[in-house]
Amino acid sequence: MCRPLRFVIVYMRRHTADLDMGKVNKMKKLGSNVTRPGPLGEQLARDNFAQPTGRRKARPARKDGDDEVLQFVEGQLGRNILKQSLAQLREVQQEADKEMEGEHIPTPDHPALRDKRLGAVSLSSKNADGESEESSEEEDEDVDETLNAVPQNTDKLVKDFEEELHLAKEDQQILDHFMNKDAAPQRKLADLFRDKITEKQTEIQSQVDANSVQTVSVSTEVQDMCAQVGKVLAKYRSGPLPKMFKVIPKMRNWEELVYLTIPDKWSAAAMYQAVRIFVSNLKEAMAQRFFNLVLLPRVRDDISFYKRLNYHLYQAMYKAMFKPAAFFKGILLPLCMSGTCTLREAIIVGSVIAKNHIPILHSAAAILKIAEMDYTGPNSIFLRIFFDKKYALPYRVVDACVYHFLKFEHDRRDLPVLWHQALLTFVQRYKEDLSPDQKQSLLDVVRFHTHHTITAEVRRELINSKCRGEDDAKMAVDE
């Protein structure tokens, strides 16, 4: 090949390559993505097999002949289907039973006639269609706002609290001398209504004007319903409560309706649920009566029989603390005034008080009342618990506590270690709120009533502390 022809061929090849590269560069400048073809095997694979898209179309399951695809329905729909099927099975079973019985006529006490006689009043939480109502569960959730506040290990809690007291057998014998031997028995709800019935009979016999007595008659159906509610509560363990029982706190004669349910036979779990309902629906005055007439006798009976308190009853005590005024007036103060409160009862009730936050005004009133009572061993336990809360008590309450300890200056009886522990706790917390005369009087008391380890601490706290008003006097002098 001649030289000029070879030169032309080389020039054409270079020019063609420059055109191709220029096209690619131009496309890159325009912003387009240049895809390279890749190996030949991948090109063939892309041509023969289509790539699946991201969209998935849901198709119903097919049925081939008699073979069916079993599917399980979950959630609320499945529960409703199961309830309807169970209801149909019951109806079929009832029809079969009726065919077997033949022409049998039920007696007046037959359950079928009894349910028909009660009419619309029902114990169940289900309506006429058999569907469960969710309102009762919602009401329970609204009441139980502080379930996490209730401790789970109540036995360990009470045992640890009891070990802190360090009581010996000699102290127990000393405390027995301060117990009230002639104390009246604890009044219950049955005693209250027995007195009311006697009073009403006396009024009728004396021909009192009927308009002056406001009574609410209870029909026979309501009495039967309350009796059935009592049977349910006697066997209650968990779950929703009867609708009738939740309406009782809203009635004017709720005490009589509660009495008809026989609260002495309620289970411990039912008592806890009852306290939840009554605390949320009753005012403090009415809640106080419920605590005093129903909850307190049940708690004392349980402690006396089992030597410990049931977990559900301990939870009920915790719930009762959400109305502190009703708790103090209905449980704590009657327990102290009875004169028969045992140390075990005081320790269990005191542990409830120690683990709860109580407003200062309620606690100050309780301290003032306990300090003015006749002395018993449990009173020292409750006073010590309140002192350990470190409230900023008014001077009136502090003076009442000082007088409480000064009453024993001329008492010749041996005082228990609980009294010395309460005095030490009081002096440690409120030593700077005492006047010089009060400190000197307390020193005279501990000079007569001594303890081999506690008395020295009491004297040290009283001597090495400021007196009431010293800081104010110094500030006045500096000015």
Image (cartoon, rainbow, N blue to C red):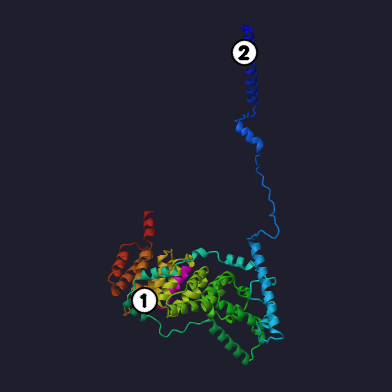
Which numbered dot is residue 407?
A: 1
Q: Which residue is mark 2?
A: 10
Residue 154: percent from left, percent from top? 44, 69
Asked whether, in this view, residue 224 is left or right of residue 357, the answer is right
- Residue type pointed to by label 1: Lys
Going by the picture, which residue comes out furthest to the front?
A: 1
Asked if residue 249 is among those painted magenta in the image, a careful observer would answer no
Residue 414: percent from left, percent from top? 31, 78
Question: Does dot 1 land on a helix, a strand or a loop?
Answer: loop
Image label count: 2
Query: Quadrant where the N terminus lies?
Result: top right
Residue under the image location 63 percent in, 25 percent down: 28
Quarter of the view holding residue 108: bottom right
Tag in front: 1 or 2? 2
In-front residue for pair 271/354? 271
Quarter of the view holding residue 227: bottom right
- Residue type pointed to by label 2: Val
Residue 315: percent from left, percent from top? 50, 70
Res 398 visible:
no
